[in-house]
Image: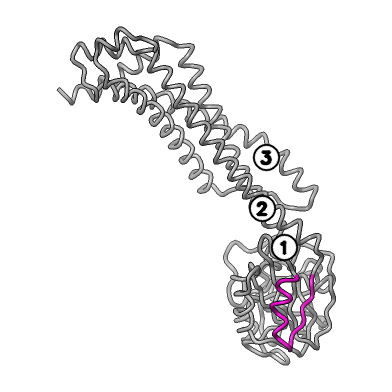
């Protein structure tokens, strides 16, 4: 007898929902609005977080560590330093990364050399960096080839005239222009060439010193103060530390903390929605106590009663979640133009989540909506189904 019940339960649940079409429609609409709002909010939040991360990275470094005898231009030091014969051991980067308050350390090595392009020879700056640890060069990429950065590639500053895929002669080798950066307004940065440490080590560069760095760019963690890190670095006698603007550091740290606070607040809202759904289904179960008692008196088991209400809850939340995804996609399309325009006015590109990320968010929203509905219906109906049929039929709505 169990096999037929599997097909009967959905039909019976659907018939029960049709008894109160207005209430059913309102519940499906409420679930759709909630699911759509959460889907759109999470998708937009992911895009804003990625865009803000890029914008924070474009603020440059909070501190720059250079050899003591190096002359530093404060403005460009936050993005890169000036070419110098003085260098630091790359191992120092690992030590600096362990200092409390340091979030990220990006080593760079700078060279001054001649380049030949379009038959003309001119002096250029070449910056070697580690793509895995970099946070000041790659966020400025405006356009790139449709592949990953690899050995033999070079990034060019915003003022350079080469185009993507063009060959550039540097250090006696021909390198491929992989990408071009946005203009930063910092002359040395906009006219420079950027490549990986491994590529720079393979070139015939003057004063080339593998395993050495010209500068260490430091990004501080949330709540860290530049003075604390500078005090910790004071034990190294052969270096000096240049600090960036404290206002930019405070803005970056403050906005990063706000992003985390918004995420925590969203989680609390979801918890509140789950509790409200549980209260709603408790009221529905209380309203149908006589029906439950009648089913029990006709021989329905407690498990069958629970399964019936769970199926009804699943239908409501499933339909609502499906409608919510359609609504959420519409909201994304509506916000795409306005948000994109606003980010463009502050010179920050709006980075939308990938298709895989959107699919994951959609799946999570659907599963969360169905889970909240099933959980909200299960507890009250399980408790009610344990009562005797006579007690249920005599206490409807209590």
Of 299 and 197, nearer the camera is 299
User: Mark 2 or mark 3: which comes first in sequence?
Assistant: 2
Residue ID for mark 2: 257
Of 5 and 205, nearer the camera is 5
Marks 2 and 3, how far apart at CA? 25 Å
Residue 72: name its quadrant: bottom right
For the C terminus, which image quadrant? top left
Task: Please determine whether, in this image, residue 88 is positioned above or below residue 53.
Answer: below
Q: Is residue 38 left or right of residue 169?
A: left
Q: Secondary structure at mark 2?
A: helix
Q: Which residue is found at the position 54% from the left and 41% from the top?
A: 267
Residue ID for mark 1: 140
For the N terminus, which image quadrant? top left
User: Mark 1 or mark 2: which comes first in sequence?
Assistant: 1
Residue 262: name its quadrant: top right
Q: Residues within 10 Å of mark 3 (few under 14, many from 20)?
A: some
Q: Secondary structure at mark 1?
A: helix
Q: Is residue 71 left or right of residue 58?
A: right
Q: Secondary structure at mark 3?
A: helix
Residue 166 % position (x, y) = 69, 71
Q: Which residues are magenta?
A: 227-243
Residue ID for mark 3: 336
Residue 336 counted in the magenta span:
no
């Amino acid at each position: 007898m169990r096999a037929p019940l599997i097909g009967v339960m959905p039909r019976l649940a659907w018939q029960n929902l049709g008894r109160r079409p207005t209430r059913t429609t309102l519940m499906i609409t409420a679930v759709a609005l909630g699911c759509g709002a959460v889907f759109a909010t999470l998708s937009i939040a992911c895009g804003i977080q990625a865009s803000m991360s890029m914008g924070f990275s474009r603020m440059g470094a909070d501190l720059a560590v250079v050899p003591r005898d190096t002359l530093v231009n404060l403005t460009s030091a936050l993005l890169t330093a000036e070419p110098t014969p003085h260098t630091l051991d790359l191992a120092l980067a690992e030590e600096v990364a362990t200092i409390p308050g340091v979030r990220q350390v990006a080593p760079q090595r700078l060279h001054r050399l001649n380049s030949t392009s379009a038959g003309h020879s001119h002096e250029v700056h070449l910056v070697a960096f580690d793509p895995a640890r970099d946070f000041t060069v790659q966020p400025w990429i405006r356009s790139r080839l449709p592949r990953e950065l690899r050995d033999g590639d070079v990034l060019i500053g915003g003022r350079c005239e080469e185009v993507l895929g063009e060959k550039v002669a540097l250090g006696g080798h021909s390198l491929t222009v992989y990408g071009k950066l946005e203009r930063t307004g910092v002359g040395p940065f906009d006219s420079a060439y950027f490549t990986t440490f491994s590529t720079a080590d393979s070139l015939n560069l003057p004063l080339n010193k593998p395993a050495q760095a010209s500068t260490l760019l430091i990004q501080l963690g949330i709540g860290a103060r530049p003075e604390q890190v500078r005090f910790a670095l004071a034990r190294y006698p052969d270096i000096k530390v240049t600090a960036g603007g404290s206002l930019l550091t405070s803005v970056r740290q403050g906005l990063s903390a706000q992003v985390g606070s918004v995420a925590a607040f969203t989680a609390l809202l979801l918890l509140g929605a789950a509790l409200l759904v549980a209260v709603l289904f408790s009221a529905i179960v209380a309203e149908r106590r006589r029906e439950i008692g009648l089913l029990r008196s006709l021989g329905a088991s407690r498990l069958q009663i629970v399964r019936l209400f769970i199926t009804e809850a699943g239908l409501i939340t499933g339909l609502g979640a499906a409608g919510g995804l359609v609504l959420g996609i519409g909201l994304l399309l509506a916000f795409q133009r306005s948000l994109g325009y606003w980010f463009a006015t502050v010179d920050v590109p709006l980075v939308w989540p990938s298709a895989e990320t959107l699919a994951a968010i959609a799946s999570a929203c659907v599963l969360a909506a169905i889970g909240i509905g099933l959980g909200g219906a299960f507890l009250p109906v399980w408790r009610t189904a344990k009562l005797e049929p006579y007690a249920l039929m005599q206490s409807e709505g209590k």
